[in-house]
Amino acid sequence: MDLWPGAWTVLLLLFLLLLFLLPTLWFCSPSAKYFFKMAFYNGWILFLAVLAIPVCAVRGRNVENMKILRLMLLHIKYLYGIRVEVRGAHHFPPSQPYVVVSNHQSSLDLLGMMEVLPGRCVPIAKRELLWAGSAGLACWLAGVIFIDRKRTGDAISVMSEVAQTLLTQDVRVWVFPEGTRNHNGSMLPFKRGAFHLAVQAQVPIVPIVMSSYQDFYCKKERRFTSGRCQVRVLPPVPTEGLTPDDVPALADRVRHSMLTIFREISTDGRGGGDYLKKPGVGEARL
């Protein structure tokens, strides 16, 4: 159906109004800028996943495809003016499987992860990500391990399979032991699945700490600017000879060491220093 001439005028006026409003909101409203940036961040990742899928599909589901995803995502930090500084990368064991455990603050963790991701390392992610359009398919092709956290029996079964995969296929896995994103500038209590996995496979745990994003990103305040983030790789923690009975103490010990480093690197001018100095914020919950 053809639009009557007046409709074209209305559409043109709406378009011109939109062109005027978007720059105005961008420069005058930090909240609008936050939503624009997050929308572009998520949309750009979905678009890059569309480009990655046919390339990854050549190999099929293969952990080596993670190198393709990493290559395609590394530039995003430059688009947002975020400087990622990595320290301690020499602590990665050179030629053996291991379990990486890292703190989890927001979807921006992807930037730090891609900066330091070792070879043949894939994340363990919640099953819902599998249905996230092109990103879910790209992750599946890259060998990302999906678990259904609501079905404990299935999650335990998957972890047992992962333990065998670590040893037979020389794979490393990346786990966020907090289990969910934490925006409060500290660390939530750790779930023990990653530690049971490491003990079952008798492989080391490599803790990785990302500094607080509070100086450039805050979901509650709708703030997203440029800034710096430090990623610290800690010495591996051996698990040889440990049993499931040792897992609680192991998880608490690793969390304590990570929280100590988190406070240190988040108050040295690289993220959230003032926020973490507030009373009661960042206290350990062991």
Image: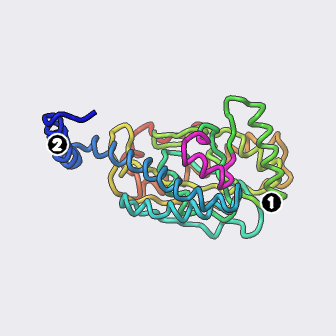
Q: Which residue is mark 2?
A: 12
From the image, which quarter does the N terminus lie in? top left
Query: x, y (%) of residue 39?
Result: 38, 45
Q: Is residue 192 visible?
A: yes
Q: Is residue 286 visible?
A: no
For the point 59% across and 66% down, the residue is 88
In the rendering, which numbered label is found on residue 169?
A: 1
Structural distance between the alpha carbons of marks 1 and 2: 59 Å
Q: Is residue 48 left or right of residue 159?
A: left
Q: Disc 2 on helix, strand or loop?
A: helix
The answer to which image quadrant residue 275 occupies is: top left
The reply to whether the magenta stretch includes residue 132 is yes
Along the viewing direction, whichever of 178 and 274 lies nearer the viewer? 178
Q: Which residues are magenta?
A: 129-145
For the point 78% across and 61% down, the residue is 170
Q: Are marks 1 and 2 in contact (CB under 8 Å)?
A: no
Q: Disc 1 on helix, strand or loop?
A: helix
On screen, residue 238 above or below 220: below
Amino acid found under the numbered disc labelled 1? Gln
Query: x, y (%) of residue 118?
Result: 64, 64
Query: x, y (%) of residue 241?
Result: 86, 52
Q: Is residue 250 left or right of residue 36?
A: right
Between label 1 and label 2, give the one nearer the viewer. 2
On screen, residue 170 above or below 252: below
Amino acid found under the numbered disc labelled 2? Leu
Magenta stretch: helix, strand or loop mostly = helix
On screen, residue 97 above or below 133: below
